[in-house]
């Protein structure tokens, strides 16, 4: 698949996962995005907020995100709305990819 080099590409990947898991796009939001390039490797870190998800929604989303898209989960905060029993919170992720432009010495 396409390497992630900016927030738009990450957003597109998220939307693809959401479409296949039946989760409303409005319930997932990228709140932070950062990319550091070092020694030919891009390290992306992002915080993704979620709300109004069922347990099943959240776990199928995370499963796709980690196994299919090779993201690493750095941190996760999950809370349950007592009245609706839906989950909200955020998770921090990181992703590594090789930079596409090779510098020739």
Image (cartoon, helix red, strand yellow):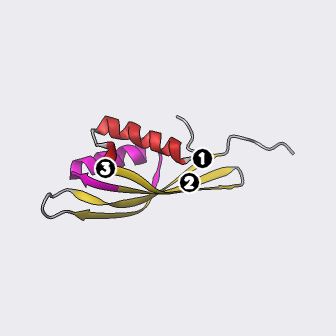
Whether residue 20 is visible: yes
Whichever of labels 2 and 3 marks the residue nearer the N terminus, that label is 3
Q: Mark 2 against mark 3, which lies toward the viewer?
A: 3
Whichever of labels 1 and 2 marks the residue nearer the N terminus, that label is 2
Q: Residue furthest front?
A: 26
**Answer yes or no: do the residues labelled 1 and 2 have beta carbons within 8 Å?**
yes
Residue 7 in percent (x, y) is at 52, 48
Which quadrant would residue 24 be assigned to in this image?
Answer: top left
**Which residue is tagged 1?**
97
Q: Is residue 46 above or below residue 99?
A: below
Image position of 25 (left or right of 69) = left
Quarter of the picture holding the C terminus: top right
Whichever of labels 1 and 3 marks the residue nearer the N terminus, that label is 3
Front residue of this view, candidates 4 and 68 = 4
Q: Is residue 70 magenta?
A: yes
Helix, strand, or loop for circle 1? strand
**Answer yes or no: do the residues labelled 2 and 3 have beta carbons within 8 Å?**
no
Q: Residue at x 26, y 47 (%)?
A: 57
* Gap between marks 1 and 2 measured at Cα: 8 Å
Q: Which residues are magenta?
A: 50-73
* Gap between marks 1 and 3 measured at Cα: 27 Å
**Which residue is tagged 2?**
44
Q: Is residue 14 magenta?
A: no
* Gap between marks 2 and 3 measured at Cα: 22 Å
Helix, strand, or loop for circle 3? helix
Q: Residue furthest left?
A: 83
Q: Residue at x 32, y 35 (%)?
A: 20
**Which residue is tagged 3?**
27
Image position of 99 (left or right of 10) = right
Q: Residue at x 32, y 47 (%)?
A: 26
């Amino acid at each position: 698949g396409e390497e992630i080099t900016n927030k738009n590409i990450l957003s597109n990947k998220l939307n693809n996962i959401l479409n296949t898991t039946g989760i409303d796009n409005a319930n997932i939001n990228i709140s932070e995005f950062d990319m550091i390039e070092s020694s030919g490797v891009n390290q992306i870190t992002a915080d993704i907020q979620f709300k109004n998800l069922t347990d099943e929604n959240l776990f199928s989303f995370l499963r796709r995100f980690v196994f299919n898209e090779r993201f690493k989960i750095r941190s996760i905060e999950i809370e349950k709305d007592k009245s609706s029993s839906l989950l909200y919170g955020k998770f921090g992720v990181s992703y590594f990819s090789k930079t596409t432009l090779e510098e020739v010495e």
